[in-house]
Image (cartoon, coloured by chain):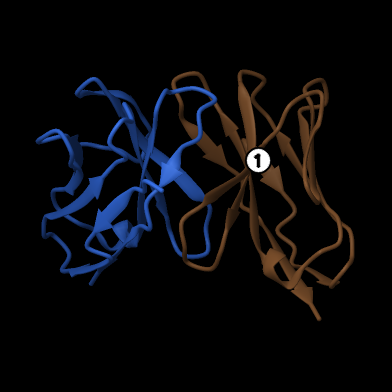
Chain colours: A brown, B blue
């Protein structure tokens, strides 16, 4: 079983749509959780951290369920500029980040 | 805004040659990392470095790889004898602390081994 598993997509959605990404992780020793964004052939950039209580940053909402080892990201009112690959990331003690394969999002006019 | 820088942006080398990839982490950061991403695949952890020594390394980081912080600013990744399968994008990252703190990634070095 992969350590971090995501649906690779692609998700093709119209502008203004709401889209949800899911992710599961296998190692319960995972300590911190993040969503990163990666544009084509560029470096990953932190989108947001993910907490059990759920957290929101503008149009983005992230949720963690430790019991199910499940992480989600919801994007509301999609913009063209949201087109990218979204990476589910878990962190272990000591700082190592483990990345999922990424979910590709394409927002069309 | 401070940023991580990496040089060169693209390195082409022949199989068996040594390469050194260079990174300048953000100045007040204490933890340094190397990751790689083979084209079309996920980002993979290689090594973490703190207090002038390796904290953790992955199975990928075998005896052909080494890291060094030769001065107060640079952080390097050396591959002694490159193989075709070392072709990838190599990202350097740094963070203030190891845990829960954001890791800032450099723009990457694309390594092509021919």
- Residue displayed at 26% across by 37% down: B62
Please tell me how crowded label 1 is: few (under 14), some (14-19), or many (20+) other residues with Cα within 10 Å.
Answer: some
Q: SS of the residue at dot 1? A: strand
- Name above or below for residue B33 compared with residue B101: below
Q: What residue is shown with label 1?
A: A48
The percent position of residue B112, horizontal first and vertical second, equals 28, 68
Left-right relation of B15 to B87 = left
How many numbered discs? Answer: 1
The chain to which mark 1 is attached is: A
Q: In which quadrant of the rendered view does residue A13 lie?
A: bottom right
- Residue displayed at 24% across by 45% down: B24
Left-right relation of A3 to A55 = left
- Name above or below for residue B98 compared with residue A18: above
Which quadrant of the rendered structure holds the C terminus of chain B?
Answer: bottom left
- Residue displayed at 32% across by 62% down: B87
Q: Nearer the viewer, residue B109 or A16?
A: A16
* Residue extending farthest bottom: A109
The percent position of residue B35, horizontal first and vertical second, equals 39, 45
- Name above or below for residue B61 compared with residue B39: above
């Amino acid at each position: 079983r992969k350590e971090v598993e995501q649906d690779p997509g692609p998700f093709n959605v119209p502008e203004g749509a709401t889209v949800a990404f899911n992710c599961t992780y296998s190692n319960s020793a995972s300590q911190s959780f993040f969503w990163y964004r990666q544009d084509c052939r560029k470096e990953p950039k932190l989108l947001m951290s993910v907490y059990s209580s759920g957290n929101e940053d503008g149009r983005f909402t992230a949720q963690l369920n430790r019991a199910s080892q499940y992480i989600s990201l919801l994007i509301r009112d999609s913009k063209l500029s949201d087109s990218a690959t979204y990476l589910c990331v878990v962190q272990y003690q000591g700082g190592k980040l483990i990345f999922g394969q990424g979910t590709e999002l394409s927002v069309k006019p | 805004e401070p940023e991580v820088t990496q040089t060169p942006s693209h390195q082409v080398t022949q199989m068996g040659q040594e390469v050194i990839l260079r990174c300048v982490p953000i100045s007040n950061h204490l933890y340094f990392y190397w990751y790689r991403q083979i084209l079309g695949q996920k980002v993979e952890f290689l090594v973490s470095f703190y207090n002038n020594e390796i904290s953790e390394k992955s199975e990928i980081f075998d005896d052909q790889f080494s890291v060094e912080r030769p001065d107060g600013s640079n952080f390097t990744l050396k591959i002694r004898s490159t193989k075709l399968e070392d072709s990838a994008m190599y990202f350097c990252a740094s963070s203030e602390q190891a845990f829960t703190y954001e890791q800032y990634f450099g723009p990457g070095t694309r390594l092509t081994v021919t």
